[in-house]
Image (spheres, grey):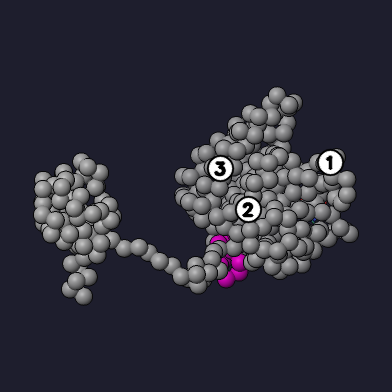
Amino acid sequence: MAKEAKEKNIKELEDLPGIGPTTAEKLRESGYDTLEKIAVASPHDLSELTGMSVDNAKKAVDAAKQATTVVYSTGSEIYDQRKLIGRITTGSKDLNELLGGGLEIKAITEAYGKFASGKTQLGFQLSVNVQLPRDKGGLEGAVLFIDTEGTFRPERIETIATAAGLDPKLALDNMLVVRAETTEQQILTIERADKVIQEKNVKLIIIDSMMALFRSEFLGRGALGERQQKLNSHIHKLQNLADTHGLAVYITNQVMDNPGILFGDPTTPVGGNIMAHAATTRLYMRKSKEDKRIVRLVDSPSMPEGEAVIKITPNGIRD
Ligand code: GTP
Ligand code: MG
């Protein structure tokens, strides 16, 4: 106990036995400026550098060793932490299971698919669900919703929120909606998001749709390089926000028919390689009978590929 207390008091070079201000200065000038560096140094080198005896240098190195620690985590500790990673319920049990519990935080989840496949509706549902208490599958957080297509519908949020047991007015107040009409607006909203994320406790960022403006502004082959460069840094900033604030990112994406695919479904998300690597998890959504939608997990670091069937009901997304 006494030893531990003593070790904890060693915070700087000067706290080491036999090292006064002058010796510490000499050490720093030679690059030995942290306790860690002293801890792995050879006493002979230190002695030569500073003129202190090898014996004293050895004592200083030993003390530095005691004062510095390596933090080990066992595999099970990391496993337990990962299970605690917050998730946002999608409203559908099957889809939650497909995703390993729900929409993951500190990650980008992309939903791509043709028109009316339900990408926006899922975004609306997530916007409501993130506000729910944790035991109901939410994160008690707010939403930053970037609408690039003009398809945000507050009336729909009102309905979904009421069905989820939230006060619809409060639910809408918890949504910060940016109607972006240019890629600059889309990019700037993300670049400047740090402050508002903290002030409003934003736990979900939605960009619906990610590529629409990039596609319409950068036309032709010549513009492709610039587009991909801008897109790349935009995505980096998004991932950075997700990591630093522990929030979830949901982006929607459009599709095209890839003529290179001769067999199977030629539907391919747009945005090329950069987009292909942007999302931690990719979901391919397609229309089925009536209000049914098939969601396919295409790309996930931890979950097997698979499908879930969801319904877009009047009250929102359900099994
Ligand atoms: P694009 O943005 O056009 O690419 O499509 P999307 O994938 O975003 O489709 P969206 O999420 O807008 O899904 C549209 C479908 O959701 C419609 O075809 C309806 O079936 C359903 N939907 C939209 N609004 C409502 C609603 O208020 N009530 C119900 N029951 N269904 C709705
Ligand atoms: Mg949409």
The dot on residue 260 is: 1
Dots 2, 1 in contact, CB < 8 A: no
Q: Outermost residue, top direction?
A: 222
Mark 1 vs ligand 1: CB below 8 Å: no
Please tell me in which quadrant of the rendered image residue 128 appears: bottom right
In the depicted structure, whether residue 226 falls above or below residue 268? above
Whether pointer 1 and pointer 3 mark residues with C-beta atoms closer than 8 Å, the reply is no
Q: Residue at x 13, y 59 (%)?
A: 55
**Helix, strand or loop under label 3:** helix
- Relative to 13, does residue 88 appear above or below in the rendering? below
Q: Position of residue 74 (x, y in %)?
A: 46, 70
| Cβ atoms at labels 2 and 3 below 8 Å apart | no
User: Which quarter of the rendered picture does the C terminus lie within?
Assistant: bottom right
* Residue shown at 83% from the left, 60% from the top: 292
Quadrant for the N terminus, please. bottom left
Report the residue at 88% width, 49% height from top.
Answer: 263
Of the two numbered discs 1 and 3 in the rendering, the one whose residue sits closer to the viewer: 1
Q: Nearer the viewer, residue 309 or 267?
A: 267
Q: Residue furthest bottom?
A: 1
Mark 3 neighbour class, 10 Å CA radius: few under 14, some 14 to 19, many 20 or more: few
Residue 36, which numbered label? none
Q: Which residue is mark 2?
A: 280
Magenta-span inclusion, residue 138 = yes
Distance between the alpha carbons at the discs numbered 2 and 3? 12 Å
Q: Amino acid at mark 1?
A: Gly
Residue position for label 3: 236
Q: Earlier in the sequence, mark 2 or mark 3?
A: 3
Q: Is residue 177 magenta?
A: no
Gap in angstroms between the C-alphas marked 2 and 1: 25 Å
Specify the segment rendered in magenta: 130-139
